[in-house]
């Protein structure tokens, strides 16, 4: 049993993260690990995002204008708090896909929640706007998170940032906090097939245990297929 498997099965011990103590461990030395030692992975990712800014920046500006035009009084980009690497909180950017009072309406729709975890998921969610449906199907609502990548808070590929606090993470969930959250990952590819948070964590841990430069590239390419060909956003 390697250290990651041990962490998944035994829970957090050792190192302090966000006031908690977890086992000091490294992920398997595959692919990107050597690059991370010399800080190559974040440099490469941030350089790639910076070089492609004229493209995604123009798309983001257009989407901001369309959303703003549909509702001048509400913000087009939301800032939400998520749990990141080592359990620290950070602000993540996202295009607004729901009506302004979505949170107030959530409780009245609780009976339709399909998710077994902390997230709220339902089919034909009436809170999602017309533009929001298009953005979610194509995953373009998460385009502003490239700003988080530029800021060094997120990676292109990694576990998705979530609303579960570090304190609320169960023992075998901890590996997902050992690296930066990602713009995409295995969960992004398969999220239309599961609404179970434990399944999400299993996908993310599997991704971490098999991570490599080649696998990162495969996940990114697969994300484009899911978003723009299969259109399996939810």
Image (cartoon, helix red, strand yellow):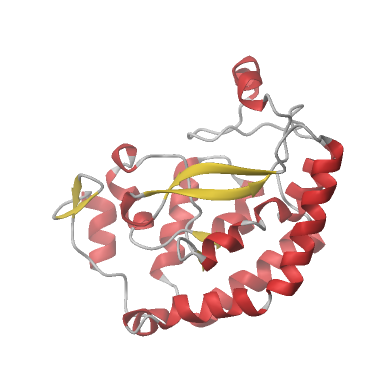
Residue at point 29%, 39% (across, down): 167
Looking at the rendered image, the quarter that the C terminus falls into is top right
Q: Is residue 121 above or below residue 189?
A: above
Residue at point 68%, 24% (across, down): 101
Q: Is residue 1 visible?
A: no
Lateral position of residue 151 relative to residue 128, left or right: left
Quarter of the figure with residue 111 = top right
Residue at the extreme top: 108
Residue 31 drawn at (x, y percent): 42, 83
Lateral position of residue 11 relative to residue 28, left or right: left
Q: Is residue 162 visible?
A: yes
Residue 178 drawn at (x, y percent): 33, 60
Q: Is residue 168 above or below residue 9?
A: above
**Front-lying residue, 231 or 196:** 231
Residue 34 drawn at (x, y percent): 35, 84
**Front-lying residue, 106 or 149:** 149
Residue 26 drawn at (x, y percent): 26, 70
């Amino acid at each position: 049993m390697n250290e990651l498997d041990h962490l998944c099965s035994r829970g957090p011990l050792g190192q302090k993260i966000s006031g908690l103590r977890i086992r000091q461990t490294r992920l398997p030395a595959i692919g990107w690990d050597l690059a991370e030692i010399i800080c190559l992975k974040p440099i490469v990712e941030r350089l790639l995002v910076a070089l492609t800014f004229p493209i995604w920046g123009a798309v983001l500006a257009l989407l901001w204008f369309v959303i703003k035009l549909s509702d001048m009084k509400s913000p087009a980009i939301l800032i939400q708090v998520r749990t990141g690497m080592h359990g620290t909180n950070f602000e993540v950017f996202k295009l607004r896909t729901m009506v302004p009072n979505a949170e107030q309406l959530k409780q009245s729709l609780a009976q339709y929640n399909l998710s077994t975890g902390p997230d709220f998921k339902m089919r034909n969610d009436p809170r999602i706007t017309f533009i929001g449906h298009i953005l979610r199907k194509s995953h373009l609502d998460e385009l502003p998170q490239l700003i988080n990548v530029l800021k060094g808070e997120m990676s292109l590929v990694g576990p998705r940032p979530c609303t579960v606090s570090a304190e609320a993470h169960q023992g075998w969930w901890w590996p997902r906090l050992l690296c930066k959250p990602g713009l995409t990952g295995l969960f992004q590819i398969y999220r239309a097939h599961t609404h179970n948070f434990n399944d999400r964590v299993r996908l993310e841990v599997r991704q971490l245990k098999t991570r490599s430069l080649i696998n990162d590239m495969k996940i990114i390419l697969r994300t484009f297929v899911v978003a723009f060909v299969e259109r399996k956003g939810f």
